[in-house]
Image (tube, rainbow, N blue to C red):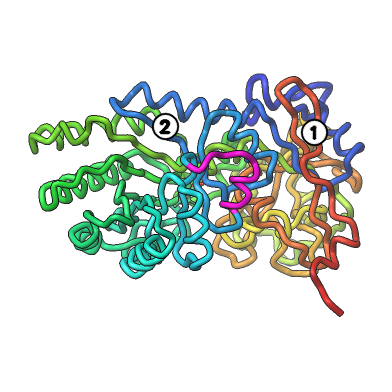
Amino acid sequence: MDWEIKDFLKIQNNQLFIEGVSTIDMAEKFDTPLFVFSEKRIKHNIERLKHAEKFIECKLKICYAAKANSNMAILRTVRESGAELEVNSGGELWKALKVGFNAEQIIFNGTSKTVAEIEAAITAEIYAIQVDSLYELELIETLARTLQKCANVSLRLVPEIETKTHSGLQTALLTSKFGMMPDEALSAFRRFYKSDFLNLCGIHLHIGSQTPDAAPYADAFKTLFENLLQIYNETGHKLSHLNLGGGFPVNYLLDKTQAGDFLPVQRDLFSAHIEPEEVLRQAWKVVEETAQNAKAFHLLENITLLLEPGRSVVADAGICLTTVRNHKKRPLKQLADSNQQLAVLPKGISIFKNLEIKEENQSKMQNDFWLLTDAGFNILLSMETYKWYYHLISAARAGETHSTPYKVAGPLCDGGDVYFDIEGENRLPDYRLLPENVQPDEVLALLNCGAYSVAQMSQYNGRQLPAIILIKDDGEIELIRRRDSYEDLLGNDIW
Ligand SMILES: *Cc1c(COP(=O)(O)O)cnc(C)c1O
């Protein structure tokens, strides 16, 4: 099958195996919903990013974006893989230090940092606090002065760089909430570059997530360099790092069986594939030319380039196992009323684009077959907020033909908890294709679930947060999060 990945995800005995381990055995042992991660895959993904250093003429520092998944064992794996870390809150900073990252391996982003968070970052002496506004820069200077410390800071810019990703994932537009205008950054450098309490060491830009093509990265790198140049020309101050942010995409449509059910923009977004080395090679070329034309190549010497990848490190390293807990059949009313099936199937129509309409299929389509699973937007929130696509297969019958359409929904007492787009904007397929005759108790798997999933899960509907396991390099299975007990549902409630 097209979703198989050599030496990682494959079909064995008709079942889905991950790193040589049967997902069905794991579902039996740990129950579902269950997230399963591969240590090898995370390491592989980090290596792929590090490899890009060979295609540029400067040092590369990979700072994994903790917000994508900050489970402690995942952070540990990232650290052991030799990557560094980008955090977004005092909580993530605390976890980072606790799991053993050194301060100089940590950078700290965020639009609304508190005084306590800034003080913690200054005291720990992290690599850079990424400053989101002039107000914040002044605040950092005041706090550093009080602490009698010098804070390393990098200014986040917001030039207009548009990408083709989801609107909620665009972050370098003036309409987005992040960063400061390049001229504000310049005035900040004029004012503070001699400060004893601020080390203005870099500038930063993050163009967004799941960016489907390489060009915006080259634009962004060029913009960073032009700003660096202007800062140097006006102040004589030379920056030591440029930070190009994260956003490398993951191909969620490796299996194209349902690709025809997507609108072209959605299809391009979910099937995006770019190699980090190619992105950096192109971006470096543009910047090198710019530097040479400006006779300023010396400003690139000894510079460090930072990346902040989140999704591309963990998304395809994790899957979610879910069990069908209920099913039902519901007549397709429009079909029952008419013989002109294609014309009158407003939402179900997409299914006919891919399926050969055989006599037997037509009669099957008189009914919608519904499957109700135990994995809803309580554990995969972006399926609801961003209508994110996670390819669904049968883990129990992975090798069988997946061509029977089902309506699939999660367990929540919430009409939005479905695997399709109830708003009718066709951002997700209306049906999922699985083997024939899927019944309750069959274990299914959602693929590419490692990023922005367990990081966003909630106990909505009194549902216990799921267990997570990690398959280690040596094949050992490590429980890295135990399933919530009912007791855990009480949390910090006081009554
Ligand atoms: C979210 C975020 C990232 C990570 O983005 P991915 O698409 O997961 O790679 C990196 N940097 C910043 C500033 C972010 O907000």
Q: Looking at this rendering, what residue extends furthest in the front direction? A: 148
Q: Over which residues does the magenta segment extend?
A: 92-103
Q: Secondary structure at mark 1?
A: strand
Q: How many marks?
A: 2
Q: Tell which of 92 and 194 is nearer to you.
A: 194
Magenta residues: mostly which secondary structure? helix
- Residue drawn at x 34%, y 32% as measured from the top left: 280
Residue 258 is a magenta residue: no
- Residue hosting label 1: 478
- Residue drawn at x 37%, y 50% as measured from the top left: 152
Question: Residue 443 sits in which quadrant?
Answer: top right
Instruction: Return the x and y of residue 351 as percentages of the image width and height.
Output: 64, 49
- Look at the numbered disc 1 and say if its residue's Cβ is closer than 8 Å to ligand 1: no
Question: Residue 342 sits in which quadrant?
Answer: bottom right
- Residue drawn at x 55%, y 56% as measured from the top left: 427
Q: Secondary structure at mark 2?
A: helix
